[in-house]
């Protein structure tokens, strides 16, 4: 049995009330294994983003519970959640990942600044920073502003930032959604290596079968529930599952 | 985090510059007012301290710095008194002064120099030193007057009169024969800097006695210089022992303090008046800050959410916004203090044109001014930024991932409920104020209303915005329609932007209604009380020589002529104005008696109802008035009359004033035409009789009403001018909001351009949105102003008998608001139209 990095226990998330009530999550229970690259997939509106927001302590579920490592999130105050996000969790978003007024280097070090560790990254921190920067291949871009970089480069800066604070888990929300296939492959390759070489745990929401094929495990969501799961998938397998899900959805609507 | 904050600040310098400008202008005005008022009191302090000797002998109950309206006492001391003082061992020297008011300088073309603002001070020359042992007067050019027919002027008076040394100077005498001439022999000023705008006429002792005391060899003051080692107190005490009754010796320090107190009251009025406008400007600036920071925070929602997602705490985010505000306020206040120095020069120039000249070198920063300016700038900015900063801290981290960045808006319902309650409370205050005729409560209600309407403007303003949308859609098609929609899209933002303008226009309209009511009431009062056919008096109520009345009395067509003299006296430890009237007064003017007689009789005075009530007096009681030089006047009250503009709180027979030692002059002459006389002809003849004395004017009813209206309007335009600054700041607010909205809508504008909207139409769209905001502010402001102005008129109905609505002015304000809207949109509209279509769409 592998160690569990994050755990969702019977999560429900409802928006609105009465007729307009939307059940974004409808009883999701899920264990995220440590040192694995997990993908969450599903058609739009399936609740995959909501699930990730809840797992990542960005949003609070209506009921149910989330654990990150040993910590149970329900009942934590904003301050504790903030600290948790800062120290345990890394993020890569689809877009608007970087603070436009800061250079690449400053963006990468932002979590450390926010934790009050600015300027003092000697020893291990410094080495780790260099390792991360070299892995994403941004050494010569460190003084550039986001507006001076391509989308792929920006996304790699975001990945470097997610890793630099050595979080116990990294959440990525459609990290390749805005990228062309070459840039996307670079970013995914980097995420894969950080799992293989640095023992990082990564959870990625995506609807792209190619992106999901980089993962160790793919969880499928539909109508706020987990409906399927495959391990070490290839692209064709994923496509088959997706098609099946969509067919089911169409039948359900008909 | 600090670095990030500063970096953000730098990256948005243009946007912040604009909101900073709002603070800069407000605080600059405040700093300017502080610098100016410091300079003002420094100027007077310099003059007072530089021209006051160790000790002064003067008539008892003398008011320092009365400005000449009160007339002149006949009480004076002989040269023997001066000699006996000089002989005292405590006294090093004693110099007799002949100082008087009412002598005026005429320019070479016969017009009056000064005379309407700062006083004209005339006195004899002697070389007695001031408290510091220096010359009290400094000669700048020429020499001192030594003989009859010689005069020394101050530099400004000589220049505005067009006189050079050696020229014949025209003078207007206060007593007897009106015209005099003297040769200009020198130019001088007070030791201590300038003259503060006063006109100096320095004469030889004999000439001064000739003018003020018909040639009697007397002095009305004596300047004392203490012998070595004698204190001012010892000096005054020693002098007191040899003085004739009715005179007192006081220390120079006390004279200086009395003068400073007398001037201080007047200077405080100016300072408070200006400070009120500075505060208004600063508050309007604060509104702009709230709005700008709200917009900036809204636009940075995703960035702030990203920071939150990456682990910054709420307080870190809030603090970062507050630090931004702090740096902004620091920079703005610094700029403002520099600008304030310039503004102070502007204020000094403005007041110079009213005759109040302050020493240029006194216009300097003091530590207090700098501290106050920084404190106000920083506190206002921080307070204004606090709400947006807290909202910034509340941005949920999940907002970083949302596709749309429009933050959720809480309902306006709570605002409406609380706002309505506060409006009602304000109405309560106002109603109380109207009932009790107390304008202060209406003011309190008005302030509540203004603040609440500002908060409720998103709701209250909706009909106005919708009307603009409909109108503009009809007039300008798609661009107009979109402009209207844009203004309605975020009513909070539109409302908050319009509110800054609303405050300015509410004040302007209130003042407008009051001025119009005052003007309308002037007609009522003039019709009702100014029953004379012609009135001869100075616009500033200065007394003039009885010679004018003597000339008028001989004019053919003048039926009845009555003379009136106003003077100040002491009653019950306070200062009162007393009117002396001759026995024809009741033939020309009607007083409404409440009790007893409506006119004075021998040793019988008439008082107003207010005076009687205040001092608990009735017909049959006696009033005891004291005049300078221990002169007393005891008169029995024979009548209590309604308040009237044609007389003062106490009216006594003219002869009684003369008996109390007041030198006879006239303050006002009322004339009834002889039956059948042609008004025009008589008017011309009276004009002619008064021509040598340009301080007086001859008015019939219409002219008199116009004269008063002219004074009201002059004040009105000054107030409008001062409020203009608040309007300018409000315009900056509109520019700010529009600029930020354009940035925010970059993609949208790109889309509109892509589907075929021309640059001109984009410009028009932005301009019309700006006009909508301006019109909203104007409409709300004018509605409030009309309401408050009307209520104030009701409360002050006793004096403001008629309500006047300045319809033409209100229309002009609306036009100004539209122009303001168009002007505010110029830069944002150009920026919007210049956006490159592709860039705009690609913008992330």
Image (tube, rainbow, N blue to C red):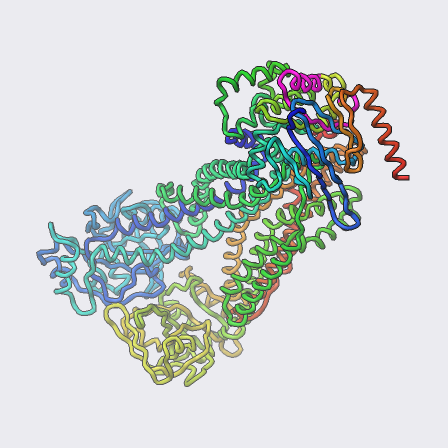
Quadrant occupied by the C terminus of chain B: top right
Residue B256 picture location, percent across and down: 26, 55
Q: Nearer the viewer, residue A165 or B127?
A: A165
> What secondary structure predominates along the stretch shown in magenta?
helix
Numbered circles on residues, count: 0
Q: Nearer the viewer, residue A20 or B350?
A: A20
Q: Picture coordinates of residue B537 (x, y %)?
A: 43, 66
**Image check: B90 left or right of A143?**
left
Q: Quadrant of residue B321?
A: top right
Tell me what residue is drawn at x 79 percent, y 23 percent: A209
Name which residue lies at 50% across and 21% down: A121
The spot of residue A8 in percent (x, y) is 68, 35
Q: Could you tell me if residue B831 is visible in this image?
A: no
Say which quarter of the image contains residue B652: bottom left
Rendered residue at 48%/50% (across/down): B279
Whether residue B670 is situated above or below residue A208 in the rendered picture = below
Q: Can you say whether B58 is above or below B135 in the image?
A: below
Q: Residue drawn at (41%, 69%), measured in percent from left and top? A: B668
Kindly tell me whether residue B501 is visible in this rendering.
yes
Magenta part of the protein: which range? A186-211
Splitting the image into 4 quarters, where does residue A58 fall? Answer: top right
User: Is A194 colored magenta in this rendering?
Assistant: yes
Residue B100 point in image, percent of width and height: 29, 60
| Left or right of A234 in this view: B624 | left
């Amino acid at each position: 049995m592998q160690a569990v990095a994050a755990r969702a226990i019977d999560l429900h998330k409802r928006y609105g009330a009465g007729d307009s009530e939307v059940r974004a999550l409808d009883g999701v229970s899920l264990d995220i294994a440590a040192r694995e690259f997990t993908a969450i997939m599903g058609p739009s509106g399936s609740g995959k983003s909501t699930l990730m927001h809840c797992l990542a302590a960005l949003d609070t579920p209506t009921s149910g519970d989330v654990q990150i490592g040993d910590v149970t999130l329900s009942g934590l105050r904003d301050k504790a959640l903030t600290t948790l996000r800062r120290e345990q969790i890394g993020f890569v978003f689809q877009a608007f990942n970087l603070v436009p007024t800061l250079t690449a280097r400053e963006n990468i070090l932002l979590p450390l600044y926010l934790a009050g560790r600015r300027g003092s990254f000697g020893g291990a921190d410094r080495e780790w920073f260099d390792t991360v920067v070299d892995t994403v291949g941004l050494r010569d871009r460190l003084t550039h502003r986001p507006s001076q970089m391509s989308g792929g480069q920006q996304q790699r800066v975001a990945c470097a930032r997610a890793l630099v604070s050595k979080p116990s888990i990294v959440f990525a929300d459609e990290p390749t959604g805005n990228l062309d296939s070459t840039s996307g492959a670079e970013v995914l390759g980097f995420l894969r290596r950080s799992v293989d070489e640095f023992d990082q745990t990564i959870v990625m929401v995506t609807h792209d079968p190619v992106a999901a094929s980089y993962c160790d495990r793919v969880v499928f969501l539909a109508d706020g529930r987990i409906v399927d799961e495959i391990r070490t998938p290839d692209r064709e397998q994923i496509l088959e599952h997706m098609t099946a899900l969509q067919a089911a959805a169409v039948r359900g609507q008909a | 985090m600090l670095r990030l904050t500063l970096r953000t600040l730098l990256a948005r310098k243009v946007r912040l510059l604009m909101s900073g400008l709002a603070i800069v202008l407000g605080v600059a005005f405040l700093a300017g007012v502080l610098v100016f008022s410091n300079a003002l009191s420094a100027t007077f302090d310099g003059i007072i301290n530089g021209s006051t000797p160790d000790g002064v002998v003067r008539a008892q109950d003398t008011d320092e710095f009365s400005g000449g309206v009160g007339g002149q006492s006949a009480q004076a001391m002989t040269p023997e008194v001066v000699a006996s003082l000089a002989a005292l061992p405590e006294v090093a020297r004693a110099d007799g002064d002949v100082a008087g008011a009412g002598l005026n300088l005429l320019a070479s073309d016969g017009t009056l120099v000064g005379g309407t603002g700062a006083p004209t001070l005339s006195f004899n020359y002697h070389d007695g030193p001031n408290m510091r042992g220096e010359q009290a007067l400094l000669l700048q050019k020429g020499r001192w007057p030594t003989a009859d027919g010689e005069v020394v002027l101050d530099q400004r008076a000589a220049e505005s009169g067009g006189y050079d040394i050696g020229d014949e100077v025209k003078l207007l005498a206060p007593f007897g024969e009106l015209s005099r001439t003297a040769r200009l022999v020198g130019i001088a000023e007070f030791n201590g800097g300038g003259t503060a705008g006063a006109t100096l006429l320095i004469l030889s002792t004999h000439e001064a006695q000739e003018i003020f005391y018909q040639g009697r060899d007397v002095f009305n003051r004596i300047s004392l210089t203490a012998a070595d080692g004698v204190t001012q107190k010892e000096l005054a005490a020693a002098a007191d022992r040899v003085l004739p009754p009715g005179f007192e010796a006081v220390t120079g320090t006390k004279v200086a303090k009395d003068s400073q107190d007398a001037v201080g009251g007047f200077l405080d009025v100016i300072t408070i008046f200006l400070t009120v406008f500075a505060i208004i400007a600063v508050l309007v600036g604060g509104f702009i800050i709230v709005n700008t920071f709200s917009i900036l925070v809204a636009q940075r929602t995703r960035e702030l959410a990203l920071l939150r997602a990456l682990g910054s705490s709420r307080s870190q985010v809030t603090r970062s916004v507050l630090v931004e505000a702090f740096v902004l306020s620091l920079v703005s206040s610094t700029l403002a203090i520099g600008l304030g120095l310039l503004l102070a020069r502007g204020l000094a120039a403005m007041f110079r044109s009213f005759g109040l000249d302050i020493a240029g070198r006194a216009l300097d920063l003091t530590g207090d001014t700098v501290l106050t300016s920084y404190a106000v700038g920083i506190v206002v900015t921080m307070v204004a930024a606090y709400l947006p900063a807290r909202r910034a801290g509340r941005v949920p981290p999940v907002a970083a991932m949302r596709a749309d960045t429009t933050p959720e808006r809480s309902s306006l319902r709570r605002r409406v409920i609380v706002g309505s309650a506060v409006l009602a409370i304000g109405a309560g205050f106002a109603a109380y104020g109207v009932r009790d005729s107390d304008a202060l409560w209406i003011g309190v209600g008005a302030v509540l209303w203004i603040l609440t309407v500002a908060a409720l403007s998103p709701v209250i303003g909706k009909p106005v915005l919708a009307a603009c949308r409909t109108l503009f859609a009809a007039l300008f098609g798609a661009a107009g329609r979109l402009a209207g929609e844009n203004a309605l899209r975020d009513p909070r933002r539109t409302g908050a932007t319009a509110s800054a303008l609303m405050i300015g226009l509410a004040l302007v309209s209130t003042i407008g209604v009051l001025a119009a009511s005052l003007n309308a009431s002037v007609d009522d009062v003039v019709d009702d009380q100014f029953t004379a056919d012609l009135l001869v008096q100075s616009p500033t109520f200065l007394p003039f020589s009885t010679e004018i009345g003597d000339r008028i009395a001989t004019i053919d067509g003048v039926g009845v002529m009555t003379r009136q003299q106003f003077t100040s006296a002491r009653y019950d430890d306070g200062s009162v104005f007393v009117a002396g009237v001759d026995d024809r007064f009741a033939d020309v003017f009607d007083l409404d008696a409440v009790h007893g007689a409506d006119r004075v009789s021998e040793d019988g005075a008439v008082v107003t109802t207010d005076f009687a009530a205040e001092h608990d007096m009735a017909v049959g009681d006696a009033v005891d008035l004291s005049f300078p030089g221990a002169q007393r006047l005891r008169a029995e009250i024979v009548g209590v009359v309604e308040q009237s503009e044609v007389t003062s709180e106490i009216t006594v027979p003219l002869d009684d004033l003369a008996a109390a030692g007041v030198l006879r002059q006239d303050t006002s002459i009322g004339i009834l035409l002889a039956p059948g006389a042609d008004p025009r002809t008589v008017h011309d003849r009276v004009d002619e009789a008064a021509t040598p004395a340009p301080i007086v004017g001859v008015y019939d009813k219409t002219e008199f009403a116009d004269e008063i209206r002219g004074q009201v309007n002059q004040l009105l335009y000054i107030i409008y001018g001062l409020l203009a600054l608040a309007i300018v700041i409000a315009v900056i607010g509109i520019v700010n909001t529009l600029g930020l909205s354009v940035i925010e809508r970059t993609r949208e504008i790109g889309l509109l351009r892509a589907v075929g909207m021309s640059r001109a139409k984009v410009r028009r769209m932005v301009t019309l949105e700006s006009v909508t905001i301006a019109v909203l502010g104007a409409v709300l402001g004018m509605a409030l102003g009309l309401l408050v102005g009307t209520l104030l008129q009701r409360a002050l109905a006793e004096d403001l008998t008629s309500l006047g609505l300045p319809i033409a002015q209100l229309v002009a304000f609306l036009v100004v608001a539209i122009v303001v809207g168009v002007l505010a949109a110029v830069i944002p509209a150009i920026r919007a139209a210049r956006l490159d279509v592709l860039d705009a769409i690609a913008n992330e």
